[in-house]
Image (cartoon, rainbow, N blue to C red):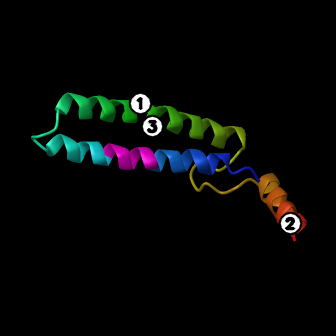
Amino acid sequence: MCACPAQVAGAMQQLRQLYDYQTRCLLDPHNDPKVHRLIADGVLSAHQVLEATLVEVIELEHWDPNTLDMPEGLRQRQMNEASDEK
């Protein structure tokens, strides 16, 4: 099974961490707030793009958007590939 959706989700987590870091930088009076606000805004934009992408991937692959249950076809493919690796 393709790990690309999980990589997108991982990138989103990293962006959240970067955003949190930028908000802490904004609290430091020694930092230029324009720099950290610009970075934080860019991170928010990137996160929105990746979130929309992930939603579309979930739709394309027919995952249940509420439970994130894997569709049967992908589940079977994953089982077959796991068996082939042994």
Toward the viewer: 69 or 83?
83
Residue lying at 21% horizontally and 44% vertically, measured from the top left: 25
Mark closest to the chain's N terminus, 3 or 2: 3
Q: Label 3's element?
A: helix
Q: Which residue is mark 2?
A: 85
Q: How far across and down, in percent of the image, does residue 20 sit?
A: 30, 48
Occupied quadrant, residue 40: top left
For image coordinates 56% across by 52% down, the residue present is 66
Q: Secondary structure at mark 2?
A: helix
Q: Residues within 10 Å of mark 1 (few under 14, many from 20)?
A: few
Disc 2 marks a residue whose amino acid type is Glu
Q: Is residue 76 above or below residue 28?
A: below
Q: Quadrant of the N terminus?
A: bottom right
Image location of residue 71, percent across then percent down: 74, 53
Q: Is residue 62 left or right of residue 55?
A: right
Left or right of 11? Residue 72 is right
Residue on which the image places disc 1: 45
Query: From mark 1 to mark 2, how far is it between C-alphas?
Result: 39 Å
Name the mark nearer the viewer: 3 or 2.
Answer: 2
Which residue appears farthest toward the bottom when viewing the image? 86
Give yes or no for contact between labels 1 and 2 (Cβ–Cβ under 8 Å).
Answer: no
Q: Is residue 18 magenta?
A: yes
Q: Is residue 59 left or right of residue 18?
A: right
On residue 47, the disc is 3
Which region shows up in magenta? 14-19
45 in relation to 23, above or below: above
For the residues labelled 3 and 1, say whether their Cβ atoms are less than 8 Å apart: yes
User: Mark 3 and mark 1: span between their CA atoms?
Assistant: 5 Å
Identified by mark 1, the residue type is Ser
Q: Quadrant of residue 78?
A: bottom right
